[in-house]
Image: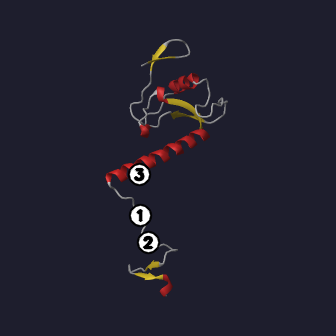
Amino acid sequence: MKLANTYGRATDEWIGATADTPCPPHVKLRIFQRYDGRCYLTGRKIRPGDPWELEHIKALKLGGENRESNMAPALVAAHKIKTADDRKILAKVDRLAKKQAGIKPNRRSSFQTNRDGPFKRKMDGTLVRRDAQ
C-alpha cells in the first residue's frame, strides 16, 4: 500500500516483521506529521518536551497489525488509559472464551492458610486451627 507523505511523493507503508518490531524514526516522524502533531486520543497539540508514544489504534491482541496505518501519536497519560481499557476488554473476552469452552475459573479455597486465615501450617506440614491453641 502506498502512502502520500508531506512532500507529495508516495512511499511504501512500513509493516513490522513481527509484533515486537519497533517503528523506525523516519516512520515515526511520518506518522507524527500525518496527525499534524496532535494526540490521536485527546486531540491536544503535542508540544516540544511532552512525552508521547506511538499507539496502535486497534490493539495487536484485538486483531490489529504492527503497520504504519494502524499507528498514531498519543500522549503517554492518555495512552496508559486506553491501554488499561484495552486490557479490560481482553480480560472479558478471555473469560467468556474460557466459559464457553467449559474451563472453570480458579477459585480461592476457603481453606486459607495465610496470616488472616483460620488455619496455620506447622513446619511438619500439618494444619491446626489458630483459635485452638
Residue 104 in the image, given as x and y percentages of width and height: 36, 58
The quarter holding residue 52 reads: top right
Q: Secondary structure at mark 1?
A: loop
Q: Residue furthest top?
A: 8
Report how far apart the C-alphas of labels 2 and 3 lie in the structure: 22 Å
Residue that label 3 marks: 95
Residue wearing tag 1: 107
Measure the C-alpha gap from mark 2 to mark 1.
9 Å
Q: Nearer the viewer, residue 126 or 39?
A: 39
Amino acid identity at mark 3: Arg
Tell me the kind of residue under disc 2: Ser
Q: Which mark is residue 23?
A: none
Q: Disc 3 or 1, which lies upstream in sequence? A: 3
The image position of residue 20, as x and y in percent, is 43, 37
- Name the spot of residue 55 as percent of width and height, x first: 52, 34
Tell me residue 107's x, y (percent).
Answer: 41, 64
In this view of the protein, which residue sits in the foreground, 6 or 130? 130
Q: Quadrant of residue 102?
A: bottom left
Relative horizontal placement of residue 34, taking residue 90 as reference (left or right)? right
The residue beneath circle 2 is 110
**At 58% across and 31% down in the image, what residue appears?**
40
Hey, which residue is sitting farthest bottom in the picture?
133
Residue at horizontal 39 percent and vertical 61 percent from the top: 106
For the residues marked 3 and 1, what is the alpha-carbon distance in whole angstroms? 14 Å
Q: Residue at x 60, y 39 (%)?
A: 78
Kindly check if marks 3 and 1 are in contact, taking CB atoms under 8 A apart as contact. Answer: no
Snapshot quadrant of residue 75:
top right
Q: Secondary structure at mark 3?
A: helix
Mark 1 is on which residue type?
Arg
Up-down: is 102 above or below 71? Answer: below
- Mark sitting earlier along the chain (2/3): 3
Which residue lies most toward the front here? Answer: 100
